[in-house]
Amino acid sequence: MSLFTYIHSFRKRISPVCRLFDYLKPALLLFLFPQITYASAEYTVEIKPAPAWVQQVQTSVPDTIPLDDIESGNYYLLVDNQLKVDEINPKVSFSRVQQLVVNQRGLEHNSAIEVDFDPLYESLVFHSITIVRGDQTIEKLASSEISVLKQEGRIEQGLYDGRLTANIILADLRVGDVIDYSYSIIGANPIYQGIFSYRRTLQWSVPLYAQSVRVLWGKTTPLYVDVRNAPNTVSQKDITLDNKPYIEYAISRSNSPILLTESNTPTWYNPFVTVYFSEINRWGRVVDWAQPLYQQTESNANNVQDVINEIKLKTSVPNQQVILALNYVQDQIRYLGLEMGVNSHQPSKAEDTLERRYGDCKDKVVLFIALLKGMDIDAYPVLVDTDEGLDLPLQPVSINAFNHVIAKVQVLGMTYWLDPTMNYQRGPLKAIYQADYDYGLVIKPGVSELAEIKIHDPQSMLVKTETYDLSAGKDGESKLTAKNQYIGDRAQNLRYQLEDIGFKALQSLYEDYYRELFSDIKLIDKVIISDDKQTGVLFTQQDYVIQQAWQPEGDNFDIGFTSHSIRNALNKPSKAERSSTLLDKFSK
C-alpha cells in the first residue's frame, strides 16, 4: 500500500472592502467610467467665461510624441487645476484639460467629455470646449448639447450617492485633433465645515506633457503644503484679488517621466509624486471634527433597548455579548449607503438604522457601539482607509484621508478591531477575523495620533489535508480524500459562497479544481460540509475516485502532485529586481 498525506497550512491577510465616499477625493483626469442609465431633467449646467482670477496656461504640441507609452490613443498635453478658497465665498475648482487624439482608438476614447458633480452642494459651469485642428480653432461649446445624467456606477456595491454626470458628445472629431476644454465646480461638501484639504498626483503611468496646480488661499488660517517623492518646489507669493489679500501657491511640471507600478505591489504603496494642501496639520483636529458626528453612539430608544435586553437575557458574559451584538448588526442590518450630501460622512442615529434595517459602514458602527454601550462595554468609532492604511502615517494630515469606519472594542482587558459590515462571522470573539487596516484614527476625546491596529492572530487560515490511496496499483482505481479546515475569514468566504452560488455549484468547483490534476477524477459522494458554530471553524470533506492516476513515463509509470494553494501563496513577481515594495499576502 502507498499512502501519501500532504498537509498545507498558511495564513493570509485580506482587506474586506467597504468603499465609501471615495468620490470626495479629487478626480483630476475624468474618464468614461460610470454606468449611465437615465437623464436628469431638473438640473441645467451653466456656460460662462472662466473667472478673472484664473491664469491661462500657454501650451503647444511637443515636437516628439511618446507613441510607445501612450494608452488608448490619448496623449495628455495639459492638466491644469486652479482652486480659490476664502472665508466667505464657496470654493471654486477650475480645471482645464488638453488631449491629443493620436489614433483610431483615441477617437473612441475621447468621443465624449464627462464631468461628475454633486448637485446637493456643487454647481458645474463649463467655460470652453474647442478643437484645434492644424491652424484652425473650432469652437464646440455653443453648438454642443450638454446632457445631465444620473449614475448607477456603484449600485452593485450598495451605494447611492446622487451624483450627476455632465456628458457632451463631440461631433466631427478626427485623428490629430487637440481637444481643449475647461470648467469649474463651485461648492464643497458642508459636512467638512469649511475645512479645506486637497491632494493631486503630479506623476502618472501615462504620458502627461504639462501640468500645473495653483491654489489661491484667502483664509487667515495657515495652509500646510507638502510634496512627496520629490523636492517641494511649490512657490508662494502674496497677491490681491478684489481688494482682498490672498496667498498664491503654485507648482508646475513639464514632460514628467511616466512611472509604471510593478507587479505584486501593495495598494498602500505610493511612489508617485504627489502634492498635498491641508488646512489642518494635527490628527486631533480631525477627531474634533468627527466627534460631533458620532455623538449618537448612545441611545435610549425603545427599539435599541429591546435588542440590548434580548442580548442580556441570552448571556451576561461580556465577550459573548460583543459577538451577539456584532452578529445582530451584520445579519439583521443589510448594507446600503445613501451617500447624498452630508450623508457621505454623517451617520444615522442608531434607532433610525435599526428601524429601517439598512445602513452603510458608519450607520452600522453607530448601532453596534450603541448596543455595546448599553451593556457597559467600551467601544469607539475608528476611521480607516481600506487601501492606503499602511501609508497613512507617511501622509500629511487630511480631513478626507479615510474611506471606511470600524469599531475599537475593549472588553476584559483585550482590544478588538471589529467591522460590522463583514458577514458570516461565527464562533467566539477571540476566534473571529478582525479588521486589519494597519492604522486608524480612533474618534475619542483626547486622541491626537493615529493608532496602529495590532492584531496578533489574524484568524485567517486554511488547512488542507490530501490523502491518496494508491494501493490498487497502476491499473486499479486510486482514491483521494481531501479535507479542508477553514478558519476566520476563510470560513466567512465559504459561507458566503454557499449562499451565493449554492451547494451544487460549489461542489462542482471542488471537482473542477482537482480535475486540473487528474482529468478522470470523480466525486464518490456529496461533499461533506460541517460548520461548527461554537468554534467558528468550517470543515469540508471530498472523496474522489481516480481511474488512471498513474501515467506512463518511458519504461515507468509516474504520478504527480501539485499544491495549487501553496503555489498561489508563493506567486512569483514578474521582475526579480524591483524598486517598489513587494506585496506579501501571507504575512504581517
Image (cartoon, rainbow, N blue to C red):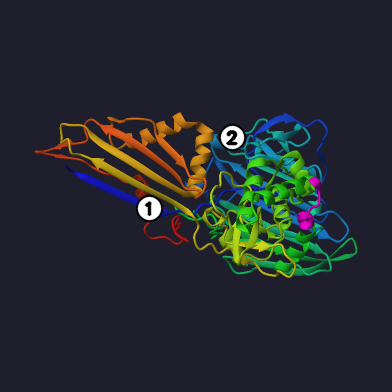
Q: Residues within 10 Å of mark 2 (few under 14, many from 20)?
A: many
- Does residue 198 appear left or right of residue 417 in this picture? right
User: At 57% across and 37% down in the image, what residue appears?
Assistant: 106
Can you tell which mark lies on residue 107? 2
Per the model, the C-alpha gap separating discs 2 and 1 is 51 Å
User: At 84% across and 61% down in the image, what residue appears?
Assistant: 86
Is 583 in the magenta?
A: no
**Percent from the top left, x then y, of residue 154?**
65, 39
Q: As drawn, which residue projects farthest toward the left?
A: 555
The residue type indicated by label 2 comes to Leu
145 in relation to 1, above or below: above
From the image, give the main secondary structure of the stretch colored magenta.
Answer: helix
User: At 36% across and 43% down in the image, what residue appears?
Assistant: 483
Instruction: Return the disc, 2 or 1, that comes first in the chain's sequence.
Output: 1
| Residue 576 quadrant | bottom left
Q: Which residues are magenta?
A: 293-302
The residue type indicated by label 1 comes to Ser
Label 1 SS: strand
Give 192 or 173, whichever is nearer the viewer: 192
**What residue did someone put label 1 on?**
9
Give 58 or 462, whichever is nearer the viewer: 462
